[in-house]
């Protein structure tokens, strides 16, 4: 950054390289500041020499966010509209605009409450509207089929992406599908019952089981995102060669399951309890306490589970819409917010019904939050959402996360490998139960909205102060 202007190559390349560097400096600082508050702003090269000469105190959080926004504005001014060929996927103007909208939304939210005017809801609204307007002008938008977003590379919904390819740039993903079709691991990323029930019905209504038979039909008539996100018991899929060789659909029920008085699921054949979302045991198939796996983003054409090459979108057009919807609502534009929410539900295959695609307009704030939960499931956004909303009360109210145990009923025959789970004669073979998904009660504390600085980091730089929420003197909310 300090010397690129002195380089001898062309000015356009200088601008584009500088724009990417500015973006990633903003990205790096946001990754720190959103978790711990302000950190030392190092904006010039530090001289090699005595260690004490480069030790700096923490800047205020507001100073850091102001610098993040400045870097993004400077990057936006010089980044190209897009990249092509081997450069496709590099940071462009649209990615920087969308990320600026995300940053402002985070600090406008209740956790930081606008940082004394640095990030008001109105500023978040303006930034996300600018991102949407620009992206619309470049042909970006919602991809028509939700489940294809992760299969059709560089489609129009992709705003910022980590690209992969096989064999040059693949990654191991052994635990996202049953072990017989995977390798070395299983149940790495299972949906909780809280997520399973959050997906709307096809008519936009909430999934609200009132009887045992309603639980048995949990997978019927849900919105399109359910089937693209959740690999449920009996799902008619055979991904990859291993699955095809087995010639079997995804059966993931408990063959010898039982629920005890404490609401833990276990296997009668060996007494092993199923009260941990990351444990499993084998029988007819691979079993899960909630009997479901993650389907979203799984590389369905990978030669094996150790060489996945699915591109992973960091920012999608849907996020820009939902960021804009939330900022619009919080800045007093409820009717406009609804207009950004509706296309998300339309793309999910939800019918209009008698209202606005099942959207609860009497509590639009919660409707937007609920939509983010299902739209971005497994996309690494839920934790930051719960933090910025100061929603740990919700987590504590759960007591524990819950799984969804699907148990073969006594006396029922096993399903055939390729039986149709949609038929009553098949899905009624199973009893469905909401069970404990955690061993311990959720005891997260409000001070954990922001992390404290690790001891090893404080030891490296005596000028750093610990957050006052963790026994120090630094106020991370200023």
Image (cartoon, helix red, strand yellow):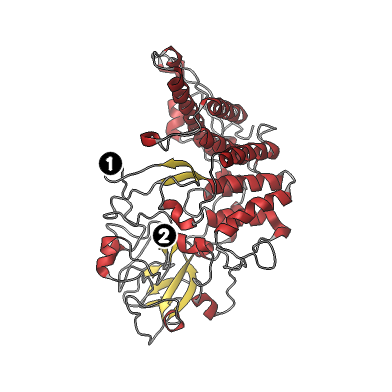
Badge 1 crowding class, 10 Å Cα cut-off, few under 14, some 14 to 19, many 20 or more, is few
| Local secondary structure at mark 1 | loop
Horizontal relation, residue 415 to residue 422: left or right? left
Report which quarter residue 296 is drawn in: bottom left
Establish if 185 lies above or below 77: below
Establish if 240 lies above or below 221: above
Report which quarter residue 86 is drawn in: top left
Q: Is residue 62 visible?
A: yes
Q: Residue furthest bottom?
A: 411
Q: Nearer the viewer, residue 179 or 302?
A: 302
Q: Position of residue 163 (x, y in %)?
A: 38, 42
Horizontal relation, residue 98 to residue 21: left or right? right
Residue underneath mark 2:
295
Q: Nearer the viewer, residue 38 or 197?
A: 197
Say which mark, if any, is on residue 215: none
Residue at coordinates 73% horizontally, 51% vertically from top-left? 335
Report which quarter residue 416 is drawn in: bottom left
Residue underneath mark 1:
168
Q: Position of residue 383 (x, y in %)?
A: 53, 49
Return the disc, 1 or 2, that comes first in the chain's sequence: 1
Establish if 414 lies above or below 92: below
| Local secondary structure at mark 2 | loop
Residue at coordinates 43% horizontally, 68% vertically from top-left? 232
- Mark 1–mark 2 Cα distance, whole angstroms, equals 24 Å
Q: Position of residue 131 (x, y in %)?
A: 59, 38
């Amino acid at each position: 950054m300090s010397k690129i202007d002195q380089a001898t190559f062309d000015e356009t390349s200088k601008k584009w390289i500088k724009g990417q560097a500015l973006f990633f400096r903003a990205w790096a600082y946001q990754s720190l500041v959103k978790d711990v508050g302000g950190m030392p702003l190092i904006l010039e090269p530090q001289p090699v020499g005595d260690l004490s000469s480069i030790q700096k105190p923490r800047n205020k959080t507001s100073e850091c966010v102001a610098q993040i926004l400045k870097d993004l504005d400077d990057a936006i001014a010089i980044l190209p509209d897009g990249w092509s060929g081997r450069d496709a996927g590099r940071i462009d103007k649209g990615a920087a605009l969308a990320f600026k909208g995300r940053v402002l939304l985070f600090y406008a939210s209740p956790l930081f409450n606008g940082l004394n005017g640095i990030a008001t809801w109105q500023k978040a609204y303006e930034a996300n509207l600018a991102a949407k307007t620009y992206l619309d002008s470049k042909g970006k938008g919602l991809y028509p089929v939700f489940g294809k977003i992760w299969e059709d590379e560089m489609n129009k919904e992709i705003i910022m992406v980590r690209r992969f390819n096989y064999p040059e740039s693949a990654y191991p993903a052994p635990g996202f599908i049953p072990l017989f079709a995977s390798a070395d691991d299983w149940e790495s990323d299972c949906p909780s019952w809280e997520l399973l029930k959050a997906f709307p019905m096809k008519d936009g209504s909430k999934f609200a089981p009132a009887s045992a038979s309603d639980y048995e039909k949990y997978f019927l008539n849900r919105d399109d995102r359910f089937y693209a996100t959740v690999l449920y018991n009996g799902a008619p899929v055979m991904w990859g060669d291993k699955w095809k060789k087995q010639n079997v659909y995804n059966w993931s029920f408990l063959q010898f399951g039982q629920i005890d008085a404490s609401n833990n699921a276990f296997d009668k054949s060996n007494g092993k309890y199923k009260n941990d979302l990351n444990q499993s045991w084998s029988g007819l198939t691979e079993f899960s306490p909630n009997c479901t796996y993650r389907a979203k983003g799984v590389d369905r054409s990978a030669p094996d589970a150790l060489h996945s090459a699915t591109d992973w979108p960091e920012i999608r057009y849907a996020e820009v819409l939902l960021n804009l919807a939330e900022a619009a609502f919080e800045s007093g534009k409820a009717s406009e917010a609804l207009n950004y929410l509706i296309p998300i539900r339309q793309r999910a295959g939800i019918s209009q019904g008698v209202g606005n695609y099942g959207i609860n307009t009497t509590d639009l704030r919660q409707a937007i939050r609920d939509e983010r939960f299902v739209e971005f499931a497994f996309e690494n956004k839920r934790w930051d959402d719960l933090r910025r909303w100061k929603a740990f009360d919700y987590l504590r109210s759960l007591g524990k996360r819950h799984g969804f145990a699907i148990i073969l009923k006594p006396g029922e025959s096993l399903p055939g490998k390729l039986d149709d789970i949609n038929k009553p004669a098949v899905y009624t073979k199973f009893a469905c139960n909401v069970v404990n998904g955690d061993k311990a009660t959720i005891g997260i504390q409000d001070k954990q909205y922001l992390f404290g600085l690790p001891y090893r980091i404080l030891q490296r730089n005596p000028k750093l102060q610990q957050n006052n929420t963790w026994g120090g003197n630094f106020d991370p909310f200023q």
